[in-house]
Image (cartoon, rainbow, N blue to C red):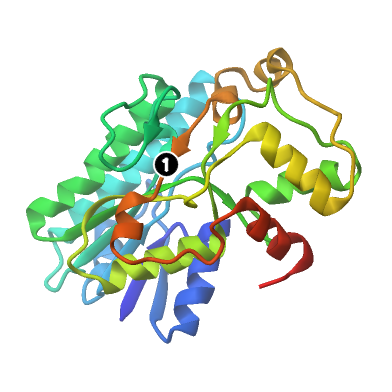
């Protein structure tokens, strides 16, 4: 298949490119900026089979009023450009796979794809608007799959690249009181899950791309210390996280207990279902 990836420069995008290329698919990069002409987008999309939209500014960081605008525009404007371009294609892709995030859910319940307990903060609102923009492609006859990512872990980058160095130095510890649940996924399971959605063309709608066993921050901290053989006493209190990251601290302090019910019911098997198995691969390269 010819698969177009929008937002291929990041950790997930580059991992998808490598994985899909190994599966003998033709993978093409698409970069959309405010100056990108409609004709240029249509030229790449027309005749392709699948488009994967990962475009969006990094959610980790301090959210100033200006950066909030960047977070929104980098997702909503890009997705709007894609769906608009589809209307101009003679042979449009039959499938749109759009990234999303478990940040759409509230912090007080357990969630699968049928959960109605959505958040009411900036991040949840952004994610809902992003998903709505992508689902608009359904009116064009395009199959749309929304991938709600958990925290993505992997050896080559992502959140773990920022987390590991202090833990290796013995400076790791819990964030806040450590009770917050973390819904995560190994990048290898993420790319496998994406291909699973591409190949099973009867599947559409919302899918949680999270490992089946979420973990609390304090449990994660303990496991990292055990696997790395390092102490984990350097906790970061909530007030300090909030001081550094402001409103963006919710990404690190809010609990997200999310389960991949639809993927598992469809027969998808996770290679790294537990945090232990994922960490063994990341730290010791054990498949």
Direction from residue 47 to residue 232 in the image, left or right: right
Q: Residue at x 39, y 82 (%)?
A: 25
Residue 263 drawn at (x, y percent): 34, 58
**Picture coordinates of residue 13, whole percent (x, y):** 50, 61
Point 79% across, 32% down: residue: 173
Q: Work out whether 89 lies above or below 23.
A: above
Residue 48 in percent (x, y) is at 26, 75
- Left or right, 213 with respect to 216, comes to left
- Looking at the figure, which quarter contains the N terminus? bottom left
- Inspect this view and state whether residue 150 appears: yes
Does the image show residue 44?
A: no
Total labels drawn: 1
Residue drawn at (43%, 28%) of the image: 123
Q: Can you say whether 43 is above or below 222 in the image?
A: below
Residue extending farthest to the bottom is: 24
Determine the secondary structure under disc 1.
strand
Q: In this view of the protein, which residue sits in the foreground, 86 or 206?
A: 206
Query: Circle 1 is placed at which residue position?
Result: 101
* Residue sitting nearer the eye, 36 or 228: 228
- In the drawing, does residue 171 fall left or right of residue 100? right
């Amino acid at each position: 298949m010819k698969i177009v990836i929008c937002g291929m420069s990041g950790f997930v995008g580059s991992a998808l490119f490598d994985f899909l290329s190994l599966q003998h698919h033709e993978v093409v990069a698409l970069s959309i900026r405010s100056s990108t002409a409609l004709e240029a987008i249509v030229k790449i999309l027309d005749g392709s089979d699948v488009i994967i939209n990962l475009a969006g500014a990094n959610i980790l960081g301090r959210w100033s009023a200006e950066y909030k605008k960047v977070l929104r525009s980098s997702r909503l404007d890009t997705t709007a450009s894609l769906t608009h371009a589809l209307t101009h294609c003679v042979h449009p892709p039959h499938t749109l796979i759009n990234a999303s995030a478990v940040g759409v859910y509230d912090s007080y319940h357990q969630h699968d794809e049928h959960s109605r307990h959505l958040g009411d903060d900036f991040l949840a609102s952004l994610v809902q608007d992003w998903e709505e923009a992508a689902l608009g492609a359904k009116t064009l006859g395009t199959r749309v799959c929304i991938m709600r990512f958990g925290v993505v872990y992997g050896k080559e980058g992502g959140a773990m690249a920022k987390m590991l160095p202090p833990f290796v130095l013995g400076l790791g510890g819990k964030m806040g009181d450590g009770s917050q649940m973390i819904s995560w996924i190994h990048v290898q399971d993420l790319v496998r899950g994406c291909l699973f959605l591409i190949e099973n063309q009867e599947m559409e709608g919302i899918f949680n791309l999270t490992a089946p066993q979420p973990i609390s921050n304090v449990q994660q901290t303990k496991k990292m210390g055990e696997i790395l053989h390092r102490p984990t006493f350097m906790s970061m209190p909530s007030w300090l996280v909030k001081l550094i990251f402001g409103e963006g601290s919710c990404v690190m302090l809010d609990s997200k207990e999310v389960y991949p019910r639809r993927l598992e019911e469809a027969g998808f098997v996770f290679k790294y279902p537990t945090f232990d198995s994922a960490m063994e691969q990341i730290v010791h390269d054990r498949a």
